[in-house]
Image (cartoon, rainbow, N blue to C red):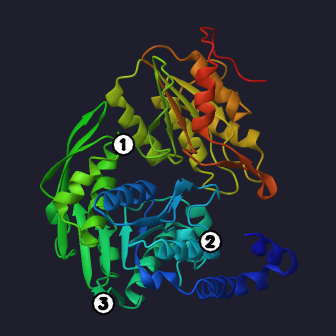
Amino acid sequence: MMRVHFLKKYIPRRIFRILQPCYHYIMAFCAALYYRFPSRHLRVVGVTGTTGKTSVVVMAAHALRANGLRVGYTSTALFSDGKQDWLNDKKMTMVGRFFTQKMLRAMVKNGCDVALIETTSEGAVQFRHRFIHYDAMVITGLYPEHIESHGGFDNYKKAKQALFAHLQQCRQKYLHGTPVSKTAILNCDDRYAHEFCLLSPAQTMGFTTTTHACGACADMVVPYTLVGLHATGVRMRFAGHMVQLKVLGAFNVANAAAAGCVCIACGIDAADAARALETIEYLPGRIERIDEGQDFTVIVDYAFEPNAVEKLYDTIAVLQPQRVIHVLGSAGGGRDRARRHALGFLAGTRADYVIITNEDPYDEDPQAIIREVAHGAVDAGKTIDGSVVMFAQREDAIAHAVAIARSGDVVLITGKGCEQAIAGPHGRLTPWDDRVVARDALRRRKPTTTPLRASR
């Protein structure tokens, strides 16, 4: 990233735009060459889509490991080289080419059978996927997000489709003398699934709640259904096998189905995949409960765009909260500015108290972002200094939320999950973890019954 900023500084913008694709391609090749093309020596599965990517990666890694395979991965939440797992502290989903190739080389050295790579549309535009020899690609679904950085939804969709075109172009791989089939794993309930089918290699696998949805699209159809929602998890049926997930959220049923399909693509029986999914205890930063013995629920979640936040509200309804206290913000740096008002309006509609604070301002004025989100909450009927308050410091916002919480309430803290930094101006990253801050706030909590007031 610093190299790009350096080039931008000294090369005229018009010329830089012409040279940029070539620069990204060369960097991708150099990274793979330096680390001796490690993706040729293990099975590589890419996971893309608008939402659910990290959950699918973590679920699939857990299920594959439970079935005896050694797995490494890169994701928004966690990294793993096959020997140890650690939190992603890079503030990037698909990290730079040299880092990814270095991780793949470490996975090969550590004897990994499978590498799971969370693969983004922005990464595809910058050729970060090039010279990674994928064997399977999963798409969780598609809807508008990051469209400003792509210049529109069609460009966003084309960037995703480029990943499947790349899968088809990847060379045939042989591991331990056995050919590895290339597989596209599709959410056939998504309205755009058929477009990705057209780009798919020889084998396509579709997971669906409606078996006819895959129709002529998928070579193999894997059905799944939601059976029931509970305060302790979700009950589902996958490929005919009952599964009791320990994670909340109806949307996690689709994520689990995608993870199960990854297992099948890697040669694991559907029944064994289903049993392994039941052993997943939690997903870092995804509907993660923070428990310090309090008589109310605190949930930290990565959701940062309206569709995902809406699903989160639907999820916590099963907890039957007395009140919902929501701590949120929105990102700067030109990241889908239109969603700020939408997020505020959604919180103003679904939460009892809305606490708006700093998130990842990048080079924008954090107070301006906060005001834009607050305007949406006010348009939904909330009042400033009443049911809406604003805090410049995220730590103060979280402390205030737990201080005013009462028995039976749910405190939602969204936008960052287990991210390890707040992104500020000039590329500055401030160490951060919502979960750590929430635990600390709970331990130091002094309950209050005073009315909500805006931070000065």
| Sequence-first tag of 1 and 2 | 2
Task: Tell whether label 2 touches label 1 (CB within 8 Å).
Answer: no
Query: For mark 2, what is the residue?
Result: 99
Q: Quadrant of residue 378?
A: top right
Q: Are marks 3 and 2 in contact (CB under 8 Å)?
A: no
Residue drawn at the location 65% of the way across and 59% of the way down: 90
Q: Secondary structure at mark 3?
A: loop
- Looking at the rendered image, the disc whose residue lies closer to the viewer, 1 or 3, is 3
User: Which element carries disc 1, helix, strand or loop?
Assistant: loop
* Residue with the most extreme top position: 449
At which x and y percent is residue 150? 58, 69
Q: Residue at x 62, y 41 (%)?
A: 433
Q: Which residue is mark 3?
A: 177
**Can residue 285 be spotted in the picture?**
yes
Q: CA distance from mark 1 to mark 3?
A: 36 Å
Q: Residue at x 67, y 43 (%)?
A: 432
Q: Compared with residue 165, is residue 277 higher up or lower down, i.e. above or below?
A: above
Within-10-Å neighbours for mark 2: few <14, some 14–19, many 20+: few
Q: Which mark is residue 281?
A: 1
- Residues 4 and 439: in front is 439
Q: Is residue 159 above or below residue 64?
A: below
Q: Is residue 420 above or below residue 316?
A: below
- In the rendered picture of this protein, how many numbered marks are placed on residues? 3
Three-letter code, disc 3: Gly
User: What is the spatial separation of the Cα atoms under label 1 and label 2, in whole angstroms?
Assistant: 29 Å
Screen quadrant of the N terminus = bottom right
Name of the residue lying farthest toward the right: 10
Residue at 48% from the left image edge and 76% from the top image edge: 108
Residue 133: tell me if it is visible.
no
Counting residues from the N terminus, which is met first, the one under dot 3 or under dot 2?
2
The quadrant where residue 70 appears: bottom left
